[in-house]
Amino acid sequence: MAERAAAPVRHLVIALGDQLDHESSALQGFDLALDVVWMAEVADESTHVWSAKQRIALFLAAMRHFAAELRERGMPLSYARMDDADNAGTLAGELQRAIDALQPEQLVMTAPGDWRVLQSLRGVAARAGLPLDLRDDTHFFSTVRDFAAHAKGRKQLRLEYWYRELRQKHGVLMDGKQPAGGQWNFDADNRESFGKAGPQNVPPPFCVAPDAITREVIALVNARFADHPGSVDSFAWPVTRTDALRALDNFIQQRLPLFGQFEDAMWAGEVWLWHSQLSAALNLKLLNPREVVTAAEAAYRSGHAPLAAVEGFVRQILGWREYVRGIYWTQMPGYLERNALDAQAPLPAWYWTGETDMACLRDAITQTLSHGYAHHIQRLMVTGLYALLLGVRPQSVHAWYLSVYVDAVEWVELPNTLGMSQYGDGGLLGSKPYVATGKYIQRMSNHCSGCRFDPAQSTGPKACPFTTLYWDFLMRHEAMLRQNPRMAMQMKNLDRLAPEALEAIAAQARAHRAAQAG
């Protein structure tokens, strides 16, 4: 296990699978003569939720490449491989095994991205009677303490105010004391669809051919996790910092200029469009958000990309990413159990196969299982929206998202899913449930043209389930929704429907819901 000469160990420095950063806070002050880095591949991290093959392969391949880099730097390393005969199968078990073997004086760890992991490793340290030096994750623009201070005393939390605060603090897209272009938010310029002609001149996605290390991991995943969802046949994610930097440059040069204009648009069979494909590299810490934001702003300042595109992208990194992390760490562990709408339906089994007659869902889920990826509108307004309207228990939706997406680490995935997508927190993270009929998907994609359902119909054999369930959702949660000013227009539209139409919609919704449960 330990790749070092026998000697007293001062610090056993924990490097988790989403902490693959040579500049991480845990590695600051590392002494080659006294300290050891500890890394462990364990089955539990792939099975506590039924992780898809792409996600497992990404984490393991990135970890093995990072370990190789540590060795090249001459850093003592204790690395447990999943296929080691005596692998304990859990992070806690493997850490205890390393403690027993190396007898360190202290454990050092950058704060992890998962409450469950933090509690588990804290428990190991306590049982071993070892001090644990838990350090801030300096990867982020802000600390959890910064967010808590921002949130203190506010009646409600909203991304926009946190985002503006961080823009000013870090001088991002600022002209003196004013936001570049004279406004903070260019959302209104970033909501175009492709029209009937579809997307034109889409740049090829950035792909990395698997090297020997990654091919070995793919073989392991296919053998060890054969019954897990998805496929690794198309695996081409960057798993090193060098390739992640190449991916960043590729995005800035080829896709950022049109990213904003079409960031909400969808098209059947078009997986990548003008999206960055950088979230996984960011969440593994192969990229630093500062360098990503700096590169994007430089593209605006040089005239390479329009301000609306750059601001929309920067808001995802500097704004949304920092915001959901603050929500997660200030609200856990109770946040995980929130279910403000008392949604109790099971997740339909076809979420794991993509075998459904609904064209938009079939495309989004099939793509997800093939690549471990879908862009934010596919997640929010297709897979997420359907689950919300159907009334699926938010914890089941959370487990699915955490399982299937390569960029899913709980600090970022849980608030996005339970809060933004499923409204399970009752409006803590977002100001309203993001609900719409199938007309939204028709406007933003070509899915409906090839679907047997009609988004204009809410009852009958051709009724779009999104449309039926939308009106049913408004009826089922009417009392709560009427208290939300941002839902006023939607509730007025509900009031225009005749009682007999409402009864027919409710009956069709019940039948549809029963069919999914069976």
Image: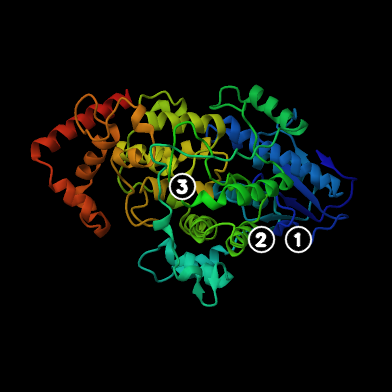
Residue 395 lies, in percent from the top left, at 42, 41
Q: Nearer the viewer, residue 386 or 447?
A: 447
- N-terminal of the pair, mark 3 or mark 1, is 1
Q: Is residue 41 visible?
A: no
Dots 2 and 1: beta carbons under 8 Å? yes
| Mark 1 burial class by Cα count in 10 Å: few <14, some 14-19, many 20+ | few
- N-terminal of the pair, mark 3 or mark 2, is 2
Q: Label 1 belongs to which residue?
A: 28
Dots 3 and 2: beta carbons under 8 Å? no
Quadrant hosting residue 184: bottom left
| Mark 2 burial class by Cα count in 10 Å: few <14, some 14-19, many 20+ | some
What element does badge 2 sit on? Answer: strand
Q: Which mark, residue 262?
A: 3
Picture layout, residue 498 above or below residue 140: above
Q: Label 2 belongs to which residue?
A: 135
Q: Is residue 154 visible?
A: yes
Q: Amino acid at mark 2?
A: Arg
What element does badge 1 sit on? Answer: loop
Depth check, mark 3 against mark 2: the one in front is 3
